[in-house]
Image: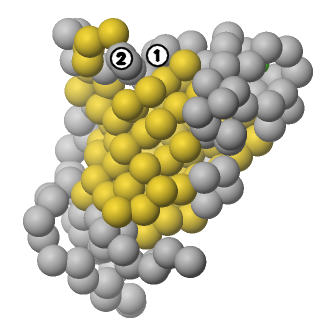
Amino acid sequence: MSHPLSLSVVAECGARVTGNEGTLLSPNFPSNYDNHHECIYSIETEAGQGIRLWARTFELQAGDTLRVFDGRDGASRPLGTFTRRELLGLTLNSTSNHLRLEFDSDGADTAPGFQLSYSSEYPGTPLLISSGHTGAQRRAVSESFDPKGRGTGN
Ligand SMILES: [Ca+2]
């Protein structure tokens, strides 16, 4: 069993993770995901911090999507819907300490999927969980699209 507050966690399908940094894997990764698969991932870091998310591997078939929401549920502001290799070279930043990801695959064709990394926006800050704290701080959203990309992957 992993510790809920460990600094680095690996989350698989359907996981809810807390911590300063971690990795999210698509179902079966590094093998291909299955058809008709739906996975929801929830990330929570300490209150008052944002979350930075980027892809180390991202390869979906057209028709299979990863949707990212800036908040704790699917009613939150969408940060984007990504398929094929569209998330490679991008960094997504949340405005709150919650991030929700929804992966859906359709009934035809699969691919290796994704290996995503996330970290708190201010790494190095001590891990402080203060329940009851209502972080009303708002930061500007920055979705940085790096035209250079991150090379051609592995
Ligand atoms: Ca598919």
Q: Amino acid at mark 1?
A: Glu
* Picture layout, residue 63 above or below residue 104: above
Which residue occupies 25% across, 58% down? 120
Quadrant in which ligand 1 is drawn:
top right
Quadrant housing residue 1 = bottom right
Queried on whether the Cβ of the residue with tag 2 lies below 8 angstroms from ligand 1, the answer reads no
Give the image quarter of residue 116: top left
- Left/right of residue 69 with respect to residue 48 in the rendered view: right
Task: Tell me which label, 2 or 1, sits earlier in the chain.
Answer: 1
Whether disc 1's CB lies below 8 Å from ligand 1 is answered no
Residue 88 falls left or right of residue 109: left
Of residue 54 and residue 50, the one placed in the foreground of this image is: 54
User: In this view of the protein, can residue 64 be seen by the observer?
Assistant: no
Residue in view at x 47 percent, y 36 percent: 115
Does residue 32 appear to the left or right of 84 in the view shown? Answer: right
Which numbered tag is attached to residue 86?
1
Are there few (<14), some (14-19), or many (20+) residues within 10 Å of tag 2?
few
Quadrant placement of the C terminus:
top left
Q: Is residue 52 above or below residue 90?
A: below
